[in-house]
């Protein structure tokens, strides 16, 4: 089995992921280095998490992906239970209950939903075989997506909620969701926007949206974005150099190791570094797009799409957020930002994707 996996794993796929991870570690090292040369514990934590993620991902490459589908619905029921438990007894960090501790391990259940939700939806839809999926199947799938998104946004974690929601709806679209249902859903969503604004969003989230639309206190709510833009612009063509970022060193960018780590990368590695990172992400997208065309089994294809959608949605939303094209909602840049739950979930998703490729090509 090990020899089979070794021979089937695409070397280009592995090289691209490894290159992005190395870039992420270098950038995180810089973002967490103090003036005296010492490192913040975030970096050491990331190294430990990466080691664990590699071990778990290696195991899931060997496990047939059908196992993920067969147990997907049960696993997502467990994740929904963890999301409820997080709201009740989660760890509060920076005003949000997004983390929960089990057996001494602290993690974000919302990140797990990026794997279990697609598996759950595919499990539900696969009950119909290749026959026409009836309204009950669509309704149940939409209800599960909405429940998951509501529980995540109540933590509050609007960024993860948006990623999970968009990915879930696009997954149903690829599955053949009738246009009539899409229009009905959009109609009721538009009617519910005032209620969402009033009761679902927190005050700071409303302020961020108001500022994004051109109102509010620009200096306060846009401070992080403005400093990130200064860092990106000051990088120039070649960048200031590794560990030489002024905005980062002077702590002008709050939480620069998390959602705004792209600005640190831009300042230190410049336009050339950004192009390199973009080419890696684009190469990964093109590779996965090409191999997806060779997957004959419809529900394996759906699982494949469902697993990569959160990954690429997170990349696009994070980059747009850092440069001010989207409101600041808290979305990490995959394999670059600090955060063990996101890193482990990303590598685990990609390992299952690789497993699908191995068995379906």
Image (cartoon, rainbow, N blue to C red):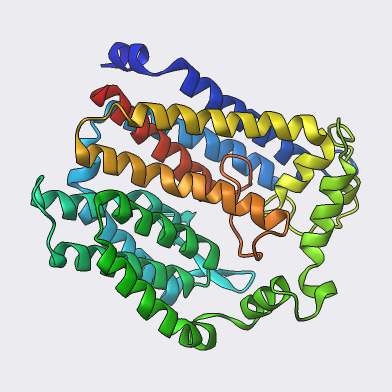
* Rendering quarter of residue 353: top left
Q: Position of residue 14 (x, y in %)?
A: 48, 22
Image location (x, y in percent) of residue 311: 48, 45
Residue 67 visible in rendering: no
Could you tell me residue 130's position as x and y percent?
10, 45
> x, y percentage for residue 1?
25, 16
Q: Residue at x 39, y 32 (%)?
A: 351
Q: Report the side of 158 relative to 305 (left or right).
A: right
Q: Residue at x 85, y 73 (%)?
A: 219
Quick one: quadrant of the C terminus?
A: top left
Q: Is residue 264 left or right of residue 160?
A: right
Q: Is residue 187 visible?
A: yes
Q: Is residue 101 left or right of residue 245?
A: left
Q: In the rendered view, would you say 357 is above or below 67?
A: above
At 65% from the left and 54% from the top, the residue drawn is: 320
Total of numbered circles in the picture?
Answer: 0
Front residue of 53/44: it is: 53
Residue drawn at x 50%, y 87% is: 194
Among the 4 quarters of the image, the one containing residue 282: top right
Depicted 91 relative to depicted 111: above or below: below
In the image, 317 versus 103, the foreground residue is 317
């Amino acid at each position: 089995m090990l020899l089979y996996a070794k021979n089937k794993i695409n070397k280009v796929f592995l090289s691209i992921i490894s290159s992005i991870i190395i870039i992420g570690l270098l950038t995180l090292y810089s973002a967490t280095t103090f003036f005296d040369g010492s490192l913040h514990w975030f970096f050491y934590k990331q190294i430990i998490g990466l080691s664990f993620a590699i071990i778990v991902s290696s195991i899931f490459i060997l496990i047939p992906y059908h196992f993920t589908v067969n147990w997907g619905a049960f696993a997502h029921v467990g994740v929904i239970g963890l999301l409820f438990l997080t709201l009740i007894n989660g760890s509060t960090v920076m005003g949000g209950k997004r983390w929960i501790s089990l057996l001494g391990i602290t993690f974000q259940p919302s990140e797990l939903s990026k794997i279990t939700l697609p598996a759950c939806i595919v499990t539900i839809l696969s009950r119909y075989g290749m026959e026409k999926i009836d309204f009950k199947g669509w309704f149940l799938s939409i209800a599960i997506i909405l429940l998951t998104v509501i529980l995540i946004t109540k933590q509050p974690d609007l960024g993860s909620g948006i990623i999970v929601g968009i990915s879930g709806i696009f997954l149903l679209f690829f599955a053949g969701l009738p246009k009539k249902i899409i229009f009905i859903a959009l109609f009721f969503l538009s009617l519910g926007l005032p209620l969402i604004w009033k009761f679902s969003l927190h005050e700071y989230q409303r302020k961020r949206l108001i500022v994004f639309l051109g109102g509010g206190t620009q200096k306060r709510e846009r401070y992080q974005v403005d400093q990130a833009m200064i860092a990106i612009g000051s990088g120039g063509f070649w960048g200031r150099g590794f560990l030489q970022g002024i905005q980062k060193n002077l702590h002008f960018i709050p939480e620069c190791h998390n959602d705004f780590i792209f600005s640190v990368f831009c300042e230190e590695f410049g336009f050339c570094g950004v192009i390199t990172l973009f080419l890696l992400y684009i190469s990964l997208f093109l590779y996965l797009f090409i191999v997806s065309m060779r997957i004959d089994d419809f529900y394996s294809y759906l699982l494949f799409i469902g697993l990569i959608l959160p990954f690429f949605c997170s990349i696009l939303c994070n980059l747009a957020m850092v440069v001010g094209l989207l409101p600041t909602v808290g979305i990490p840049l995959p394999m670059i930002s600090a955060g063990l739950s996101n890193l482990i979930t990303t590598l685990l998703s990609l390992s299952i994707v690789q497993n699908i490729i191995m068995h379906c090509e």
